[in-house]
Structure formats: C-alpha cells, structure tokens
Image (spheres, rainbow, N blue to C red):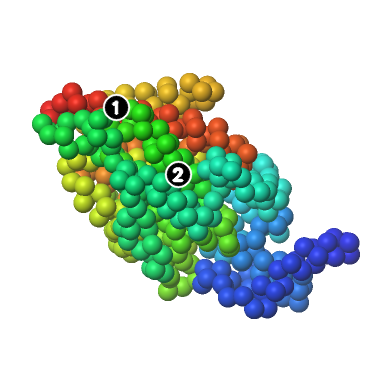
Amino acid sequence: MIPVGFILHLLLLASSFIAVIKGASVGKENELDLQSIYERYGRNPEDTWLSVLDESYSQGRYARWQQLSTNCGSTGVDVEQLLSDWFDDGMAVLMSEDGTTDPVEVAVAPPLVNEAQEKLRESNCTASVVAEDLEKLFFSTLSPVRVANPITETFLELQEIEKFIHDLVAKYPGQAQIKQIGETENGTAIHMVIIKPKPSRTVPLNGTVTPPVVFVDSGTHAREWLSVSTSLYAIQQLLEQPSSPARQVEWRIVPVVNPDGYAYSWNTNRLWRKNRKSGSGRCQGVDLNRNFDINFAGVGASSRPCSYQYCGPSAFSEPETRAVRDAILEVGSRLKGYMALHSYSQVILLPWAYKPDEHPNLSNMTAMGEGMVKEISKARGTVFGVYDTYKNFYPGSGISMDWASSIGIPYTMTLELHDKGEHGFLYPASKINDAVTEVWKGIEYFGQEIARQSREGYFLRK
C-alpha cells in the first residue's frame, strides 16, 4: 500500500507538467508508448499519477530521478547494453562516454532505481546512488543572475552565445571575423570565429609569412556546456590579450558545433548528447563524434538509433560534421593543430581512438600534451593526464580527432575538461572561472608551440 501522503506529494510534483501533457508537442524520441511501458514494468494505466510522471520524464524532466555510479570491474559488462530497453524507452540515460569504462554513470527514473541496482548486482557490478534528485541538481548548477562577465560566471544559452561572439568581434575590426560554415537540418547557423595573428607576431611557414592555423571546436555533444564556455573564453582572451604568444598563429574556433542539440539541452532535456536529426522511429539524433569518416561504425560506436553513441546511417551524414570537415579542408596545409573540447575527465586524449596501433607522431603529441598540462597545473595544481586513447582510455570510431589526424594534421587531440566526475556534465556555474582560466593556459601553450615549431622549420621536416 502506497501512503496517501506520498501520492499527493507526487501529484503536486506532477502538476507543473500538466500543461505540457495537454498541449505541447514533443520530439519523436520522447513519444513513449505508455501502454507498452506499463505492461513491461507491471504498472496499472489507471494510476494516473504515475502516467503524469512518466509523461514528465518524456519531456526531459528529471524530478526524483537518481544518478547511479556503477563499477563492473573486469566482468566486461556493457551497462548501456544491459539497460538498453530502459534507455530506448527514455526511462534511463547514460551519463558517461560509454557503457564499459568504469565508473559508468547512469540516470534512472524513480520506479526503476531498485530494479536497476538489482540487475547490476546480478551482473556482478556495484551500483551506488550519487544523486537523489537530478532536477534539483540541474538547477543548482546554474547562476541565479546574469553577471558582468558571463563567460566566467554563468553558462550561456544559444542566443546569448551568438550575441556574445558578434559583440566581441565587432570590438576588434580587422582582427577577427565570424563565418557561417554550415547549418543544421533545422536551418540553424553554425558559426566559426576566425582570429588573425598580430602582424608583428606572424611566423614563417614554408619560407613565407603565411601563418599556421589552429582549429578548435566545442559543443559537439549538447550536454557538455563547459566545453562551450572554454572556447568562448579562449576567443575572448585571444582578442583582449594581443601580446599573448598564441597570437602568432591564426585561430579558427567553432564554439557550438551542435547548436540544435545545445538549445535542446537547455529547453527540454539537460542530458541530451546528440544532434537533433529526425528519425524514422521515436529515437532522434546522431552522436556527431562518431560520424566522421574514420573506421565508421566500428568499435566504440553504435548502429542503434536509440543509443547515445549512434553513429548515423553513413560517415558525414550530418550537416554539422560536414560543416566541420569542410571548414578544416578549406585551410589546407596551413592547418597544423586541431583540438576538440569535450567534458569531462581532465585528460588530453591522443590518437588513435579506433585502433591500438601507435600513432607515428605520438611522442611529439605526448610532449605537446605534457607541456599543456604543466601550464594548466600552475594556477591551482589541477592535474590532467595525457593518454593514448585506445590503449589507456576508451576505444571509439568515427571520432573527429582521428579523422583530423588521418588527413595529415600534425597535432590533433581531444581535451576532456573538468572535472573527474564530482559534477560531470552538470558542472556548476560557480566553478566556471577556475576551469576556463586554467585550461586557457594549456590552449595558449598549444598555439605558442605550433608557432615555435613552425618558426624553427619542424613542419618542413614532416
């Protein structure tokens, strides 16, 4: 018997979502077949308070959802596969990069928490509750007010990002420009900021004064808000600090590769990862960092449209990845460094991710990464690692870093930002300043080293 008070509490909680249930339209991947879910989980469709809550979950609402931290050790259990029915139904969300690298973080709807823990225990995995109400946790990560310098104190919504970069670039005519490199399936523009080197700091490349180029992108995975804040801060610092050694190269920065997904993570589902590609079934979206043409649909990617690692129907099937591809290819041989910003884990990942073979430039890339983490640590002692991705982190196919390396860019990496799991994707706004100012020093070092090596003829010997 469920206490009446508990039912009333849930009814009150659900009342805020009634308007949504009565009239709002939702994406296909959120249109749950409630009857089949009731049958699968043994519920009574006449329990209207449960159906109201189920519908609220389908809207991306996470009131009373719990976050489980699982560890399967050497069992080889894939948590995403183990709970795949729940993921497909929208009753659970994978909060880690993959389902096999411990610890795997999973968000689970309230009625299924106990059952999830039992399924994991039966598979010889441990599972502990690390957050008891994700909805409250979401709100606690936001800044309550807009502030003077939004980059370091609050996360920005998509329209605020657009205004910020346009206002900033307008202050530095002749030094920076904004270029549209593509648009999403829904017609949303994808913008790149180009920051020219200071003329007096331009370094020679192949015997000329043509500057080398560094390409940075972020916001590929919608829920990784800190990656966007980091690239925006880098743009700000490059323009406001013209004496920075990093201004010896040309920068091309795409702050939000996945604008539709990013907006969706704000207005509907905070834990959304993929883009907003329409699907033939109820599952939408493609994992853009599995859609590049490098060992497509191989290890670490999924062909299941409901998976958070769904690679799409073909390599470069998505307008977002084609936009990044074309923007990179346009630069040609001047492009000497590529960096993808993601979160979280505090590591610099190096190719290859799709195979265990050692990259021919691994020693130099490792030295670059170690120089970056040294600079990052100077401010507060924050520790980042440097890893060969496949051997020491996780295998993955169709990843932008590997594709960029495969076309001949000497230095490519994925920079997984703060933290190590304490907050994960739900990084609090109160800590943005520490994170972006630390990582900026590593990004600055990357540009400085590209300039130095160009000046000293390193790339002529490649």
Q: Which type of secondary structure does the marked residue at label 2 adopt?
A: helix
Q: Quadrant of the C terminus?
A: top left
Mark sitting on residue 381: none
Badge 2 local density, few (<14 within 10 Å), some, or many (20+)?
Answer: many
Residue 68 shows up from this direction = no
Instruction: Write down the residue under mark 2.
Output: 232
Q: In this rendering, is residue 354 above or below 206?
A: below
Q: Nearer the viewer, residue 75 or 254?
A: 254
In this view of the protein, can residue 64 be seen by the observer?
Answer: yes
Mark 2 vs mark 1: give the one in front.
2
Name the residue located 45 percent from the left edge and 51 percent from the top edge: 167
Q: Which mark is residue 449?
A: 1
* Depth order, front residue of 429/60: 429
Query: Mark 1 Cα within 10 Å, few/some/many (few <14, many 20+)?
Result: many
Residue at the image point whose x is 17% and y is 31% from the top: 204
How far apart, in angstroms, are the residues tagged by discs 2 and 1?
21 Å
Are the two marked residues, 2 and 1, in contact with CB atoms closer than 8 angstroms? no
Identify which amino acid the numbered label 1 is placed on. Glu
Picture quarter with the N terminus: bottom right
Q: Residue furthest right?
A: 4
Residue 453 in the image: state x and y as whole percent.
22, 26
Residue drawn at (41%, 46%), measured in percent from left and top? Answer: 171
Q: Is residue 49 left or right of residue 31?
A: right
